[in-house]
Image (cartoon, grey):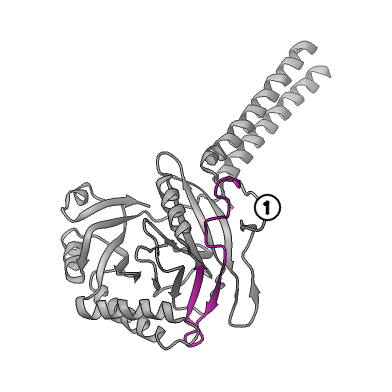
Amino acid sequence: MFKQTVKGLLILSCCVFLALSATVAWGSSIGKKPKTPKYRVEFKRHLTVQETEAFLKEESLQPFSITFSGKGYSCGGLISSPEEIENLTKKLEEELAEQLNEEELDFQYKTAVKEYLQEVKNDGFKVREIECLGEPKEELKKKEFVLRVVSD
Amino acid sequence: MFFRRRELLLCLVVFGCLAYANLVLAAEFATSCDYYHVHRDVDYGRWVPCEGSAWRSSSDPYRIYMKGIWTKEDADSARYWQNQGRCLEMQFHYNGNSISGITWGSNSATAVLDYDAGEYNVDIHLRYWGSVAYNSGYIQNWVKCNRKDIIGTSYVRQIHFDDSGNHCYGQVMCCIGAYKDTSGKYYDCYGEWYSRWKNGDRHGPYY
C-alpha cells in the first residue's frame, strides 16, 4: 500500500516537473514567431535608381523594400523586383504631390515635402538602402558602395 | 518498503529544487536583457516625443499620418539609445494580414521601413538614426496601403537588443495617438505605455 503511494507520488512529481518544464518552454517561446529572413543593405553613398536596379540584378537579390532619402525627407515602399522601382518612384512622386493639397498638414511639413519633391525632380530619387529576402551573401559587404549589411 | 520516509522526503526536496531552479533559470533567461532597460529616473519618458497624434488623411482614406513632437533633446537621446543598441520606432498597426502596396514617407531624412507580413496585426516600424529630424521640431510620418481598415495605433517604442544583436524585447515609451477607423470605432493604444506624466515602469520580454 505504502509502496504504491510512493510510486504514485513519484509519478505525480515527474508529471508536475515535466508539466512545469513544458509550460516554461512554451512560455519562453511566446512572441518568437518564425519570420522570413530579411537583411538590409545600407549604402555608403546614395545610389541612383539605375545603379540600384543594376546592383540587384547583378547580385540576383530578391528585394523586399526600398528606402529613398534626401535633404530632410525620406520615403519608400515595398517592391518584389528591380523592375518595380521605377513605378514606385512615380507613385511616390504622385503621393507626395497630393500631400501639398491636404488641408490638415501644416506649412512646415508641406515645405519639407515641397523641397524634397523639387530635389527629386532635379536629381531623381536617391536610394539610401534596400531590404532583401533570404540570407545575405558575404560578397555583398565587399562592394565599394556598401556600408553595411544587417540581418533582420 | 520501497522507500524510507527520509528518502522520500529527500526525493521530494530534490524534485522541488529542480523545479524551482528550472523556473528561476527560465525567468532569468526571459528577463536577461533587462540591463538595457530604460529606468524611470534616467530617461524614462522624458526625451521621446510623447505628444502627438495619428489621423487618417481627409483626402485619401488609405493614408494615415502620425505626428510626434521632436526636440533636439529627443534627437540626442535617440542617438544615445542607438549607441546603446536600441532603436526608436514609431509604428502603424493594421487589422489584418493581407496588406500590400505599402508606401510611406517621413520628414526624417533617415527613417526606414521595417515590415513583417503574416502577422494578424502588421507593424510598420520607422526607425531613426543619428541626426534624426534634427531641426524639424517634430516627426511626421505617413503610411499608405491597400486597405482602409487601418487601426492605426501609433506610439514610440524602443526595441532592445542583447549583446549579440538579437532581438531582446520591446518597450513602449509613450503613446502617440489612437485612431478612429472608417466606421468611427475608436481604438486606443493597447497595453500600457510610458508617458512623461505617468509613473509607470514596464518590464518584460514580450507583449
Residue at the image point whose x is 63% and y is 31% from the top: B24
Question: Is B129 placed left or right of B175 in the picture?
Answer: left
Mark 1 burial class by Cα count in 10 Å: few <14, some 14-19, many 20+: few
Query: For the residue labelled by badge 1, is the local secondary structure a helix, a strand or a loop?
Result: loop
Where A30 sits versus A22, above or below?
below
Question: Is B33 placed left or right of A77 in the picture?
Answer: right
Range drawn in magenta? B40-68
Residue at the image point whose x is 82% and y is 18% from the top: A2
| Residue B128 in sight in this render | yes
| Residue B4 in sight in this render | no
Q: Main secondary structure of the magenta part?
A: loop
Where B80 sits versus B28, above or below?
below
Magenta-span inclusion, residue A7: no
Subunit of label 1: B
Q: Position of residue A125 (x, y in %)?
A: 25, 73
Magenta-span inclusion, residue B43: yes
Q: Position of residue A10 (x, y in %)?
A: 72, 24
Residue at the image point whose x is 30% and y is 68% from the top: A69
Residue with the most extreme right position: A1
- Amino acid at circle 1: Asn
Where B129 sits versus B101, above or below?
above
Q: Position of residue A12 (x, y in %)?
A: 73, 29
Q: Identify residue for label 1.
A: B199
Count of residue discs: 1
Question: Is A104 placed left or right of B11 in the picture?
Answer: left
Where B23 sits versus B36, above or below?
above
Residue at the image point whose x is 24% and y is 58% from the top: A43
Q: Quadrant of residue A85?
A: bottom left
